[in-house]
Amino acid sequence: MGWQAIRIWTVLVYGFMFLPVAVVVLLSFNANQFGSFPMTGVSLRWFEELWNNDAVMRAFRTSVVLGLMTAAISTTLGILASLALVRYSIPGRNAITTLLIAPILVPEVVLAVALLLFLNWLGIGKSFALLLAGHVIFTLPFVILVVQARLVSIKRDVEEAALSLGASPVQTFFAVTLPLMLPAVAAGALFAFTISFDDITGTLFWKPGGVETVPTQIFSMLRNSISPEINALGTVMIVMTVGLPLLGAAVARKLAMKGGS
């Protein structure tokens, strides 16, 4: 009876958490322009209007470009940092590791304000480069943690075998180490893209005037009125932020199985 009660309580808690998400998705297909129950019919009207909304599409393109650039930079830096921290004995390795993952421990709003004030002190104003740098700082620890966990499990023997057969360190990395790390690298890149695409707290502080991402565009639209287009845009966000990690997990599993075979 005790375990049954825990299961029922768990289902109720998760249902309470995800019911608003389900309502947003359901109302995005509502034909009624007031976006309320009862639904008068099923329609893709709001997705079509969303597609024809220049401000939303501009914000979507900005989020995609920003997410891809963040993922590329964070993944590259994460791989290099993980290799240095795991494969080499460098002075202050533990302190450097703690410093690199510290952005996870600091509340994002504190990190956003601190970076903004620091750059203002240096005389650097808001720009897309600042926005990109802030997203990289926030997503880099996630990539490092994922890649490090994979790199630790890779035996040094396989790399030493390649070196003993005449391969250079660079050839060993691209032919042996990187393929073995690929599941973690792919997962880290998708995590970085998803976190960047979904971020709003730091983006509100770092973005320059006239630049909007999808989350800040939703925030701006909510200040005026609750339009059914917001439900449609929320559904697109949910599909991307949930679908990409699931896709990353599937790709990582497939790559791991391929590497194991």
Image (cartoon, rainbow, N blue to C red):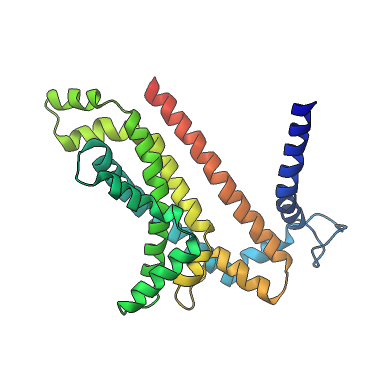
Q: Nearer the viewer, residue 243 or 144?
A: 144
Q: Can the viewer see residue 128?
A: no
Quarter that holds the C terminus: top left
Q: Say above or below: 238 vs 253.
A: below
Query: Residue extending furthest top?
Result: 261
Where is residue 79 shown, x and y percent of the image?
Answer: 31, 44
Quarter that holds the N terminus: top right
Where is residue 172 shown, x and y percent of the image?
Answer: 20, 32
Q: Nearer the viewer, residue 197 or 152?
A: 152
Q: Nearer the viewer, residue 58 or 181?
A: 181
Q: Can the viewer see residue 157?
A: yes
- Which residue sits at x=35%, y=48%? 75
Where is residue 22 shown, x and y percent of the image?
Answer: 73, 50
Where is residue 176 shown, x and y percent of the image?
Answer: 26, 30
- Which residue sits at x=72%, y=74%? 225
- Which residue sits at x=64%, y=60%? 233
Q: Say above or below: 16 vs 55.
A: above
Q: How many circles with numbers are drawn on the protein? A: 0
Q: Say above or below: 55 vs 107.
A: below
Q: Say above or below: 80 vs 117.
A: above
Residue 52 lies left or right of residue 201; in this view the side is right
